[in-house]
Amino acid sequence: QLQLAESGGGLVQPGGSLKISCEASGITLDNANIGWFRQAPGKGRDEGVSCIGSSDNSTWYAETVKGRFTISRDSAKNTVYLQMNSLNVEDTANYYCAATGATGDCQTAPYAVWGQGTQVTVSS
């Protein structure tokens, strides 16, 4: 069974850092495009945050997080991480990861497997 499980969310003060994880079962993340998305409170629209490509480990970041967030992959643990630095209140959201075995640009990949998310709250 294909599953993604996010963890590592929590409460952090503005300016702080947090590292969230996306662990997979039933799918090898090395062979998949992986994306991080978020949904802020009261907003029905999901926002693509970052992704990492399956073929060349190319990465993409939304303008709102570029320079502050870093996506990485640990093959041994079959886990993808999102390191988030210089967090601000606008980063408060439920963060979830998605995966697809389809090749191509991770920004436009047809994500088929979704996790449940981990809540990140930035507040003083």
Image (spheres, grey):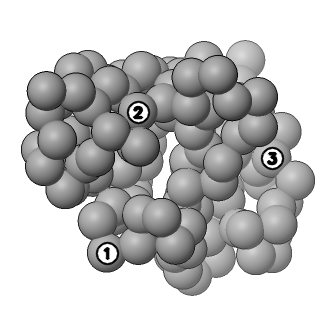
Earlier-in-chain disc, 1 versus 2: 1
Is residue 71 placed above or below 94 in the rendered structure?
below
Q: Classify mark 3: helix, strand or loop.
A: loop
Answer with left or right where residue 89 lies relative to residue 48: left
Is residue 96 placed above or below 50 in the rendered structure?
above
Labels 1 & 3 near each other (Cβ < 8 A): no
Tell me how far mark 1 sits from mark 3, CA to CA.
Answer: 25 Å
Between residue 35 and residue 40, name the one nearer to us: 40
Q: Residue at x 65, y 53 (%)?
A: 48
Q: Name the residue under label 1.
A: 67
Labels 1 & 2 near each other (Cβ < 8 A): no
Earlier-in-chain disc, 1 versus 3: 1
Q: Mark 2 points at which residue?
A: 92
The answer to which quarter of the image holds residue 55 is: bottom right
Between residue 29 and residue 61, name the one nearer to us: 61
The answer to which quarter of the image holds residue 56 is: bottom right
